[in-house]
C-alpha cells in the first residue's frame, strides 16, 4: 500500500509575490546563525582562558562541539546562506559526518577535562541541573550518531522505507540539538559563568544560543515535515 505522506519543503507553497523576500530573509537568517555559532564559541573560549586550569578547557571543548561543529554540520544542508551550497549532496553528507565526528571528539574531551577537574578538586559529580543535562545531551549525541550509521547501512534497522529512516534521523537530530541548546543555556546559570559575565552582557549571552536553534528547527521542519497528499 503506498504511503499517504510525502516530504516536501514548506516553502514550496509560497506564492511568487513573496518569493524573493522569503528567500532573502531565510538567507540572512542562515548567515546570522553561522555568525552567531562561531561568535558564541569564540566568546566562550576567550572567557574561559584555556590553560589556566583543567576546568578552563571544558567550556572551550563543549562550545566547539555543540555551538560550532553541530550547528555547522546541520546548516551545511541549507540551500540559503550556506558556504557549502555549491557542493554535491554526497559531499555535504561527508562534511556532515566529519562535523558530527568532531562533535563527539570535542564533547568527550570536554567531559574528560570536567571529570579530571572534579577529581583534583575533590568535588562531587552530577550535583547540578547543568551536569545532568550535559550527560543526557552526550548520551543522545552518541545515539544519534548510531542512527546516522544506520542511514549509511539501512539494513541494520528493519524499516521498509528509507524515507522513514531519514525522517527519524532528522527528528532525533533536532531533539539532540534542542537538548544541547538547553544545556548551553543552563551553563549560563552556573556559578562560574555568572561570576564571569554580569549585567546586560549576561542577558545577551543567554539569548545568543536561541537564534541558531530557531534557524535549525526551521530548516529541519521545512525539509522533513510530513504533509498529507491532497486528493481531488
Image (cartoon, rainbow, N blue to C red):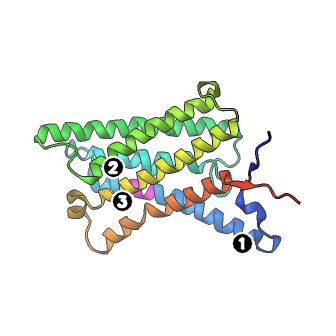
What is the x, y in percent for residue 109?
Answer: 33, 36
Residue 99 covered by magenta stretch:
no
Specify start and end residues of the magenta stretch as a single range: 38-42
Residue shown at 36% from the left, 46% from the top: 62
Residue position for label 1: 21
Residue position for label 3: 185
Q: Could one spot residue 61 in this view of the protein? A: no
Using the numbered discs, state the Cα–Cα distance from disc 3 to disc 2 in whole angstroms: 10 Å
Out of 50 and 124, give the one closest to the viewer. Answer: 124
What is the x, y in percent for residue 101?
Answer: 48, 35
Badge 2: residue crowd in 10 Å (few <14, some 14–19, many ≥20):
some
Q: Closer to the N terminus: mark 3 or mark 1?
A: 1
Residue 16 location, quadrant: bottom right
What is the x, y in percent for residue 216?
Answer: 55, 56
Q: Closer to the N terminus: mark 1 or mark 2?
A: 1
What is the x, y in percent for residue 183?
Answer: 36, 53
Magenta stretch mostly in which secondary structure?
Answer: helix
Badge 3: residue crowd in 10 Å (few <14, some 14–19, many ≥20):
some
Residue shown at 30% from the left, 56% from the top: 187
Please identify, in this view, whether the residue under mark 1 or under mark 2 is nearer the observer.
2
Badge 1: residue crowd in 10 Å (few <14, some 14–19, many ≥20):
few
Residue 217 location, quadrant: bottom right
Cβ atoms under marks 3 and 2 closer than 8 Å = no
Image side of residue 89 versus residue 55, left or right:
right
The residue most toward the right is 232
- Eyeballing the image, is 115 above or below 5? above
> Which element is circle 2 on?
helix
Residue 200 location, quadrant: bottom left
Please identify, in this view, whether the residue under mark 3 or under mark 1 is nearer the observer.
3
Image side of residue 113 versus residue 223, left or right:
left
Residue position for label 2: 133
Amino acid at each position: 500500500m503506498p504511503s499517504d505522506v510525502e516530504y516536501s519543503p514548506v516553502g514550496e507553497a509560497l506564492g511568487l509575490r513573496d518569493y524573493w523576500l522569503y528567500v532573502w530573509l531565510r538567507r540572512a537568517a542562515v548567515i546570522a546563525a553561522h555568525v552567531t555559532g562561531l561568535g558564541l564559541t569564540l566568546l566562550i573560549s576567550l572567557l574561559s582562558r584555556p590553560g589556566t586550569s583543567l576546568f578552563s578547557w571544558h567550556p572551550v571543548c563543549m562550545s566547539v562541539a555543540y555551538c560550532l561543529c553541530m550547528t555547522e554540520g546541520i546548516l551545511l544542508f541549507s540551500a540559503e546562506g550556506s558556504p557549502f551550497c555549491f557542493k554535491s549532496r554526497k559531499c555535504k553528507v561527508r562534511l556532515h559526518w566529519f562535523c558530527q565526528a568532531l562533535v563527539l571528539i570535542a564533547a568527550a574531551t570536554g567531559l574528560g577535562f570536567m571529570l579530571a577537574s572534579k577529581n583534583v578538586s575533590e568535588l562531587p559529580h552530577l550535583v547540578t541541573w547543568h551536569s545532568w543535562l550535559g550527560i543526557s545531551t552526550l548520551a543522545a549525541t552518541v545515539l544519534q550518531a548510531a542512527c546516522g550509521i544506520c542511514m549509511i547501512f539501512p539494513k541494520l534497522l528493519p524499516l521498509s522505507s528509507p524515507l522513514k529512516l531519514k525522517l527519524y534521523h532528522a527528528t532525533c537530530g533536532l531533539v539532540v540539538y534542542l537538548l544541547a541548546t538547553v544545556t548551553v543555556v543552563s551553563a549560563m546559570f552556573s556559578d562560574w559563568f555568572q561570576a564571569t559575565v554580569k549585567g546586560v552582557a549576561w542577558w545577551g549571552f543567554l539569548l545568543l544560543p536561541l537564534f541558531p536553534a530557531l534557524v535549525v528547527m526551521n530548516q529541519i521542519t521545512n525539509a522533513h515535515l510530513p504533509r498529507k497528499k491532497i486528493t481531488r
